[in-house]
């Protein structure tokens, strides 16, 4: 999950400045982008949790949300219009919220001894906190290195999410083997 959270919050930090600097939208509209991302994220936090409880299990649910978040970040590099940026913000807000909301449940689903669940949760959140702390500044350094272009940072964020998704697949295989129908 370190890799996932390393790139996950990049769009939340930089979507407004991207809108102002690259697309040329107003400051009010750029703040509306962040409101759209967070507002639609409410659904992205609730709906996947409900379906993971009733059908797939949390680890099986977080994996596709992680890959989709990475792909949407890659697609952000092709956004050139105001309406395209609002569509990106809405879609990314929905998908990335699924990763944020499913993390604690996925972490607890990998714990076999419930006496250690609290310790594991604390350790997991401690490690992820460093990713949340360093990811956006690294992306900012990549924007600066790219002379104000966001491509390097967008590719960094998308790549970390795809790599994080691959590590989640590895965790799933380590837990259940190649049995893809098992709920976990």
Image: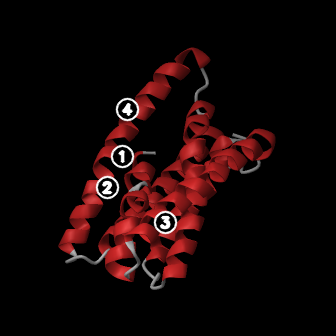
List the single residue furthest toward the top: 115
Residue drawn at (49%, 64%), measured in percent from left and top? Answer: 32
The residue beneath circle 3 is 33
Report whether 34 appears left or right of 65: left
Report whether 167 appears left or right of 57: left
Crowding at mark 2 (Cα within 10 Å: few <14, some 14-19, many 20+): many
Q: CA distance from mark 1 to mark 4?
A: 10 Å
Asked where in the image residue 112 lies, by quadrant, the reply is: top right
Residue contact at pointers 4 and 2, CB within 8 angstroms: no
Q: Earlier in the sequence, mark 4 or mark 3?
A: 3
Mark identifier at residue 136:
2
The residue beneath circle 1 is 132
Of residues 170 and 142, the one drawn nearer to the viewer in this rendering: 142
Q: CA distance from mark 2 to mark 1?
A: 7 Å
Residue drawn at (24%, 67%), measured in percent from left and top? Answer: 142
Residue 17 position within the rendered picture, expressed as x and y whole percent measured from the top left: 34, 68
Of residues 52 and 94, the one drawn nearer to the viewer in this rendering: 94
Which is closer to the viewer, label 2 or label 3?
3
Residue contact at pointers 2 and 3, CB within 8 angstroms: no
Q: Quadrant of the C terminus?
A: top right
How did the renderer colour the structure? secondary structure
Q: Earlier in the sequence, mark 1 or mark 3?
A: 3
Q: Earlier in the sequence, mark 2 or mark 3?
A: 3
Residue drawn at (46%, 83%), measured in percent from left and top? Answer: 78
């Amino acid at each position: 999950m370190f890799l996932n959270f390393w790139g996950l919050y990049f769009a939340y930090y930089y979507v407004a400045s991207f809108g102002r600097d690259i697309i040329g939208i107003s400051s009010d509209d750029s703040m509306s982008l962040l409101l759209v991302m967070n507002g639609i994220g409410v659904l992205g936090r609730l709906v996947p949790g409900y379906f993971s409880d009733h059908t797939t299990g949390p680890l099986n649910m977080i994996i596709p949300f992680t890959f989709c978040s990475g792909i949407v970040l890659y697609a952000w590099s092709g956004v050139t219009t105001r309406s395209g940026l609002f569509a990106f913000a809405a879609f990314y807000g929905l998908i990335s919220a699924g990763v944020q909301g499913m993390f604690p449940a996925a972490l607890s689903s990998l714990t076999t001894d419930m006496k250690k669940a609290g310790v594991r949760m604390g350790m997991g959140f401690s490690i992820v906190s460093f990713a949340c702390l360093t990811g956006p500044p690294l992306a900012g350094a990549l924007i600066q290195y790219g002379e104000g272009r966001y491509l390097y940072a967008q590719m960094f964020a998308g790549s970390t999410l795809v790599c994080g998704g691959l590590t989640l697949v590895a965790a799933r295989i380590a837990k259940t083997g190649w049995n893809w129908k098992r709920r976990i």
